[in-house]
Structures are given as C-alpha cells and as structure tokens.
Image: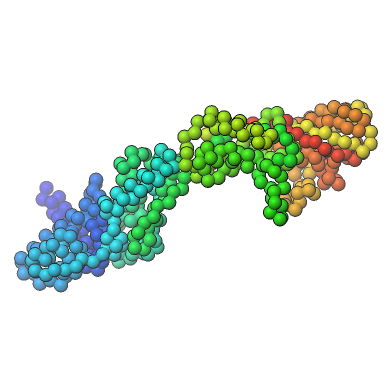
Amino acid sequence: MNQNIEGFSKLVENIVNKAESILIEYPLCNSCLGRMFAKYGIGLSNYDRGFTLKTLLAIKIHNEYTTNTPRREVHKILAENGGGQIASTYRKIYGEQIEPRKCHICSGKLGETLIEAIAREACSKLREYSASTFLVGIVLDREILERELEIIVKHGSDSTESIKRELKREIGKAIMETCNIQPDFAKPDVVLVISFDREFNYSISVEANPIFLTGKYWKNGRNISHIPWYTRSGGKKYPISIQEFIEYALKDLFEAEEVVIHAAGREDVDARMIGSGRPLIIEVKKPKRRSVPIDQVNSVLLEKYTIAPIRVEVYSESSRREIGLIKETSKQKKKVYRVSIYSSEPVNPSELQALEEFFSNREIKQRTPTRILRRKKDRERRRRVYTVKTYMVSNRVFEALIHCDGGLYVKELVHGDNGRTTPSFSEYLGKKLIPFELDVVYVEDVK
C-alpha cells in the first residue's frame, strides 16, 4: 500500500513540476495546458486536467510562501502565465495585482463558450442542408500548430494530445448534443469544415457529400450529345445533352449546386439509345435537400420528357465506388447495334448471307478512328463480333443487327475507315458502304 502511495505521489510531483516548467516559459489556458497531459486520467476533459494542475501549482506556491522559500519572481511568472487560481493566490499572498497573459496557443479563446457558439452555428448549417449525419473537419493556421509543437519539442512529453484532435472531438460532441444528430465516420451527409486563423478566429464551411442514384437512360432522338458540346467560338454544337436534361430536371428538386452523369459508355451523338437503355449513375453535387423519394425523382424526370426525346429512370441510391465499377465493367459488356447501310453498288441476299457467316464470332482489329484522332491517342484495339443479322431494304440499302463487344466502333466496322478497321463489311463485300443511321438497341447490364 505504502509503495503504491509513494509511486502515485512521485507521479503527481513529476507532472506538477513539468506543468510548472511549461508555464514558466509559456502562458497557457486550462485546455492547452491540460492537453500536454491528456493521457493521464480517464473521463477528464483537458480543461479539467489544466484546472487541476493549476490548482496544485497554486497550493505549491502557497506552501513555498508559508515555508519562506524565496521564489517570488517564479511565482509571479506562473501567475502571469497561468492566470486563474494561480493569479488569485499570488495576489492574496503578495498583495500585488498582475495581468494574466493570453494563451500562447489559442489566445485564450478555447473553452466552452467558443465550442457552444460553434455548435449553434454548425446546427444552423446542418438544418440548411437537411443533414441527418455529419462529420467535423478542422483546419488550423500553420502558426497555431507551430506554437503547440514548439512546447512539445522543448518539454518532450508522450502524454500530449493535439489541439486539432481535441477540437474535432469536443466540437463533434457539442453538435451532437445541440442538434440531436449523430456523426457518421464512413459516409456522412455533410462535412463541417471549421477553420481557425492565427488569432483563433473561426469560420465554418459546408462540404455536402453528393447523392448518387443508379438508373438508365433512353435517347429517342438524334444529335443529342452525352454532355454539353461547345464549339471553339463558345456556342453550343447541339441543342441538348443527356446531362443537361437530367440536371434541368433534378437540380432544383435537390436544391443542388450541380448534377453530372457517369454512364456505362456512350453512343455517338447521332445514334439513338433505345431498347434496353444504357446504365448510368447520376451524381447530385452539394444538395441541400437530401431525402427525396425515388418515386418523386422519377415523376419529375418523366415530367421533363416533354422538353427533349430523352427518358431517364432511377432505380435506387448508389455510391461513388459504383462509378468506377460501371465505367470499368462497361468495357467488357456486350452490346447490340442496329445500323442502316447504303451501298455504292447493288447487293444481293446471298452476299448478305455470306457476310453473316463470315462475321460470326470474328475478331476485329481497329485503330483509333480517323474521326476522333484529334482527341484520342492512336492505338490498336481488338474487339469481337459475335453475330450479324441482315435485312434487305432495297438492292442498295440494308440493315444489320450486330451483337458485339463493348467499345467496338460500329461505323468503322461497316466502312473500314480506309483500312484502319479490318476486317470490315466494306472490305469483305468489296463495295463502298456508308452507315447512315445507327441505334444502340441493347446494353448488357453492369452487375
């Protein structure tokens, strides 16, 4: 028992002596002093630790005074740098008024009053964004971090906690209590970024995490681009895009800053997307309204169908991880195209039958098409055509249903692109062929 008491007494003596050596050199508030000893005690706040240490120092100062230990100058420095009960004790025993200094780290602003003020303002912002979960992020001026690090380096301690960690924890707890809202460390609706300048003045900004929705779109008209397409002069090349249509429909519904789309590939601007529809993920950025039922989303999208021949259907909520998945797996998914083809010379049924047989399970080598070389690197890709079914419209016009790998350039499969795609329909038939209408009729689901 005596050994335990002696060990505890020695520990307290060492902690108090270290606190004294720190306060002799730096003025610190209760929280900033207590943080230097954060690993001592369970269930205590750093403010409690600092208050306790200053109380013990005040007792020590009074004891030294009553035992005639000549340390008045040290006591005065401790009173100026510690304030509170140390300053009060100094005034009472020496009869001298002193002016406590501002905390070296937080300028004396870190405390319950500040935390409560931040929590109230944060709650107001959370309500503005209809958030049901949150996370706190702290940004500190570099000078604050350097002030704290200077003390830790000089007075080396393995029991410290960073001011950033304390702020994050205490502000988070205060927001929970004030707003009755829970933090979510994995997928919060909103991240509250609280920034402190060198004088410890703060500002709060909101980073509302996006909402992701999975669905499909159908493009029942031509000359509709995937995203807005602008000319060099700044004008729009096409009147509407899939992304603009969806943003027009959903931006106000979610009170969002922006709406963008991530699709499983894309068809040419002059091609329709019919049949099965193309899988996509809609990203609603910085929404202020989050709890929108899927039925309401689809109702609004259907309503807007009158402005363009575009139909979109949303099935469920998704995640950012699914964006990479949908883009990557779309390259391996099979597709079916319908293409209308004009021939410079007459064709007959037997030629088309032979064409079907030749392109059954046929590997196609394609260099990057001439029409997109200005924006894509020239390289060879290999894709497979599984089946081709043809239908004669006239002796110079026929249609073909092409079942193939995703990423196959179908127009080039038809005309050959001056030998950059081989084999091609044109090469096989020995005729100049022109694809004049293209539809995507099936896209394999991304799973």
Q: Is residue 28 above or below residue 307?
A: below
Q: Residue visible at 29% across and 53% down?
A: 114
Identify which residue, 155 or 51, lies in the foreground: 51
The quarter holding residue 353 reads top right
In screen coordinates, is 141 left or right of 11?
right
Residue in view at x 46 percent, y 48 percent: 207
Picture quarter containing residue 233?
bottom right
How many numbered marks does the figure carry? 0
Q: In which quarter of the image is the C terminus?
A: top right
Residue nearest the observer in this picture, 360 or 26: 26
Instruction: Decide which of 165, 297 is in the foreground and name it.
Output: 297
Q: Which residue is drawn at 71% across and 33% down?
A: 220
Residue 290 % position (x, y): 47, 37
Q: Say which residue appears at 23% left-offset and 57% top-offset.
A: 30
Position of residue 24 relative to residue 350, above or below, is: below
Instruction: Report which quarter residue 343 is drawn in.
Output: top right
Q: Can residue 244 be seen in this view?
A: yes
Q: Nearer the viewer, residue 327 or 346?
A: 346
Instruction: Please state the horizontal and vertical placement of residue 221, each as a whole percent of the image.
Output: 72, 35
- Quick check: 152 above or below 416? below
Give left or right: position of 192 versus 295.
Answer: left
**Percent x, y for residue 39?**
27, 52
Position of residue 60 in the picture relative to residue 398 (left or right)? left
Farthest-out residue, right = 346
